[in-house]
Image (spheres, rainbow, N blue to C red):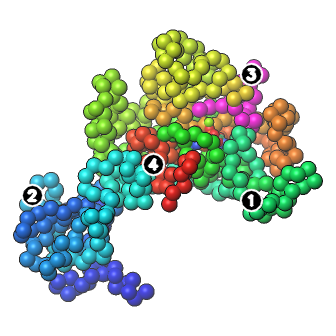
Amino acid sequence: MLAKFLNQYLISAKGCTMKREKIKSILSSSETGKEILVKGWVRTKRGSKNVNFIALNDGSTIHNLQVVADVENFEEGLLRSVTTGAAVSVSGKLQQSQGTGQNLELIAEKIEVFGEADPDKYPIQPKRHTLEFLRENAHLRFRTNTFSAVFRIRHAMAFAIHKYFNEKGFYYLHTPIITASDAEGAGQMFRVSTLDPVTPPLDDKGNIDYSEDFFGKATNLTVSGQLEGELGATALGEIYTFGPTFRAENSNTTRHLAEFWMVEPEMAFYDLADNMDLAEEFLKYLTKYALENCQDDLQFLAKRLQEEEKSKPQDQKAMDLIEKLQFVADNDFIKCTYTEAINILSNSKPFKKKKFQFPVEWGVDLQSEHERYLVEKHFKCPVILIDYPKEIKAFYMKQNEDNKTVGAMDVLFPQIGEIIGGSQREENLDKLVARMKEMDIPAEEMDWYLDTRRYGTVPHSGFGLGFERFVQFVTGMGNIRDVIPFARTPKNAEF
Ligand code: 4AD
Ligand code: MG
């Protein structure tokens, strides 16, 4: 305890104790002439025989603090161990920088090296690494500018989600991660079991006897907290869940993870129009929050994207990242029915030229290529598609009077495609049970869910935002594996 306390402080050359300051606050206060203490990791070191310039980063900001070390003030060898990746503490005086490129610099009086990073072995060197290389070294990629920016923004977005819902009077409801139900009815679940996989207990028919399993029945990792969320919403009014969700779908794409985070608000007394309004307001709020609170990181990522875009042909160049965020924050989303969307796609150039890989006809599920055509080429704006064919949507969605479609809504975003999936829920018990029968969903096991419709049922709605897809949108990162700290994808659960 005492050691930890002492570690917070360093005795300066003048003998007074100093508290460590974060680089972000040092750079924003710009107060020169004072003694400061900083701790962080060396990004680069350059210099001459007489003086070394160390770029120090402590994770609090994308910006480094320039440390100037006069070689003659330090014992032989110390500065040699200050290499890229080394963890150091530096105290000294802050002054106006003599050089260009930064306003302030720290004239080092004392340097302590906590941990060296052997330059012959340390993988993160001060050069441009590919995202693929960094994905393979994902345990160290937080130490790069790109990933530290992405994960600071991810944090800011998670915080803004809680702030938004709290300000609107929604309650954060923690829905279970282990569940016996399949919320989406898609059957793409990871089993949770403590049975011996080699010789599991069998019943009379030779099937695995889950009554002997840990929970006394077959259980899985949840694919969505929605069904439990509905229990909360039909009592607390408006709730949201925000937690990890799991899908055992074998999709090796830039938009799918086996473990991802989903934000799911569920609201009593909301119809589909209210649901759409909330989704639009929510996405704009988060986008504005990023613009107002993450400027430094966004500017860095925007510049990075500009570099990447340079190699692309003129007509394929994407909008500037910050312009794109501002555009989404400022413009109304387009609302369009699934049927209208099929008409638009059937009359589109890529359809006529057979450029779409997947079929377009009424009744098919839209693929990312179709969603992106609607958003990027046709409407040039985020789109909310509603009223999908009931056959391609989940059992719980409100059945429309045409008997063909349901009150579903998918929000489609540029570069991403579907970012939100939601619906008004079927509140009529008989209709819901009939639909479950049609879809072979065992009503007996869902009795608890059906009680919401048996007792005090209300019109209600909700949606799920794929958190990583939203972070992809805000950061401009093309691959979903690059916006979650530790990606879980088919054949990959490293770290
Ligand atoms: O459209 P989905 O499957 O909807 C639901 O699960 C509903 N229960 C939500 C609700 O109404 N409460 O998933 C919602 C969102 C998708 O729009 C997508 O953004 C994201 O979750 N998502 C994934 N993100 C990453 N990897 C995956 N494998 C994803 N599957 C869905
Ligand atoms: Mg969906």
- Name the amino acid, label 1: Pro
The stretch of residues the image draws in magenta is: 393-410
Q: Which residue is mark 3?
A: 404
Q: CA distance from mark 3 to mark 4?
A: 38 Å
Q: Which element carries disc 3, helix, strand or loop?
A: loop
In depth, the one of 447 and 288 nearer the eye is 447
- Residues at badges 3 and 4 in contact (C-beta under 8 Å)? no
Q: Which element carries disc 1, helix, strand or loop?
A: loop
Identify which residue is drawn at 35% across, 26% down. 316
Identify which residue is drawn at 84% across, 48% down. 445
Q: Which residue is mark 4?
A: 483
Q: Say left or right for 91 vs 7.
A: left
In depth, the one of 137 and 273 nearer the eye is 137
Q: Say left or right for 380 vs 265.
A: left
Q: CA distance from mark 3 to mark 1?
A: 43 Å
- Name the amino acid, label 3: Lys
The numbered disc on residue 197 is 1
Q: Main secondary structure of the magenta part?
A: loop
Residue 79 falls within the magenta-colored stretch: no
In terms of sequence position, does the residue under pointer 4 or pointer 1 come before the other?
A: 1
In terms of sequence position, does the residue under pointer 3 or pointer 4 come before the other?
A: 3
Q: Which residue is mark 2?
A: 99
Viewer can see residue 256: yes
Q: CA distance from mark 1 to mark 2?
A: 65 Å
Crowding at mark 3 (Cα within 10 Å: few <14, some 14-19, many 20+): few
In terms of sequence position, does the residue under pointer 2 or pointer 4 come before the other?
A: 2
For marks 2 and 4, give the one nearer the viewer: 4
Q: CA distance from mark 2 to mark 3?
A: 69 Å
